[in-house]
Image (cartoon, rainbow, N blue to C red):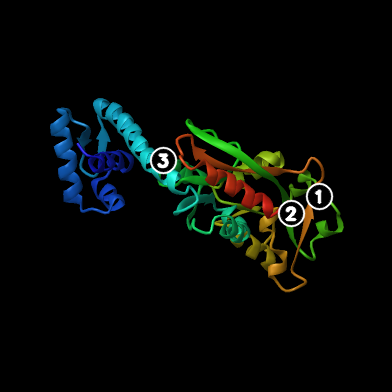
Amino acid sequence: MTLTELRYLVSLARFQHFGHAAEHCHVTQPTLSIAIKKLEEELGVALFERIKNSVHLTAHGQKIIAQAEKVLEEADALLGIAQTNQNPLKGPLKLGAIFTIGPYLFPHIIPQLQLLAPEMPLYIEENYTAKLRQKLKFGELDVIIIALPFNEPDVLTLALYDEPFILLLPLDHTLTKEKEVNCEALSTDQLLLLGEGHCFRDQVLQACPNIQQRFNQSNPSDITEGSSLETLRHMVASGMGITVLPQSAAGENSYAPGLLTTRPFSTPSPKRTVALAWRTSFTRPQVIDVLNQAIRACQLF
């Protein structure tokens, strides 16, 4: 067996579909199918149950997949050690971030990284926490930027900074008369929130139980969902309602004067902790130090 065959095997176990796995591995479906069949013959066990439009791991397959993942991780570690002996800050870094952090953090840290590690270009991906978790696990990303808590076996985290939440309002809203706003004040207004899948949405609901109570109603018509923080900001500017944003995404100056303003929450104000996460087997620890240094140099909060 070869490492390439093991990568095909792990990919098929992940996607449970020959076509999708082949696409992910950048090979044709027949190439992947032949490799999997050859591997099953060599091992003398059936690894997958073939169903019409998908495949499922057998009991033997689950054990072999777990071991294959370890083998591939160790093989990647060998390459990482070789690269570390050359220059750990030379070569691409696969960096991920959740949707509600990436667009607002990357413009600040990339100039810092170009100064600290000019030979380390970034492959960047923005995605949901669940997707980034999987890509980190399978080695498709080296480091991810997420909000705590983040618990995953064999993954380390480093807290970077606390980011307060703020309330984004139309300039003529009655709450602009207040210097600070209590979460309880959000009980009646038309509220704009991110859709399901965004961890920031969950953090807002956890920080403001009264909003969660509104969701528990059979028909919370006074809550509107948006696909991104930018979408929410645009809807507030249009007069659709109000929203809660991380402070970095407020963007009140992106519009002409007279449309938007922000208000902080009263103590204890809701916030999130932004952190780095990486596999314990990651062989370029100097990269973590440089990322930490670059982000802290931005003095965001």
Q: Is residue 219 visible?
A: no
Label 3 neighbourhood size at 10 Å, few (<14), some (14-19), many (20+)? Answer: some
- Which is more N-terminal, label 1 or label 3? 3
Q: For the residue marked with disc 3, what is the amino acid?
A: Ile
User: Which label is found at residue 181?
Assistant: 1
Identify the amino acid type marked 2. Answer: Leu
Could you say which disc has been placed on residue 167 in the image? 2
Residue 166 at x, y percent in the picture: 73, 52
Find residue 81 and name its label: 3
Q: Position of residue 94 (x, y in %)?
A: 46, 51
Determine whether 254 is above or below 245 in the image.
below
Mark 3 residue element: helix
Whole-angstrom CA distance, mark 3 to mark 2, is: 47 Å
Q: Is residue 158 above or below residue 46?
A: below
Amino acid beneath label 1: Val
- Residue at 37%, 37% (x, y): give it: 73
Q: Is residue 229 left or right of residue 300?
A: left
Within 10 angstroms of label 2, few (less than 14), some, or many (20 or more) residues? many
Q: Nearer the viewer, residue 71 or 189?
A: 71
**Relative image position of residue 188 (x, y in whole percent):** 74, 50
Question: Of discs 3 and 2, which sits in the foreground?
Answer: 3
Dividing the picture into quadrants, the one containing residue 4 is top left
Q: Nearer the viewer, residue 39 or 165?
A: 39
* N-term-proximal mark, 3 vs 2: 3
* Residue located at (62% from left, 52% from top): 294
Q: Residue at x 74, y 60 (%)?
A: 169
The residues bearing labels 3 and 1 have C-alpha atoms spaced at a distance of 52 Å
Relative to 58, residue 237 above or below? below
Q: Is residue 282 left or right of residue 4?
A: right
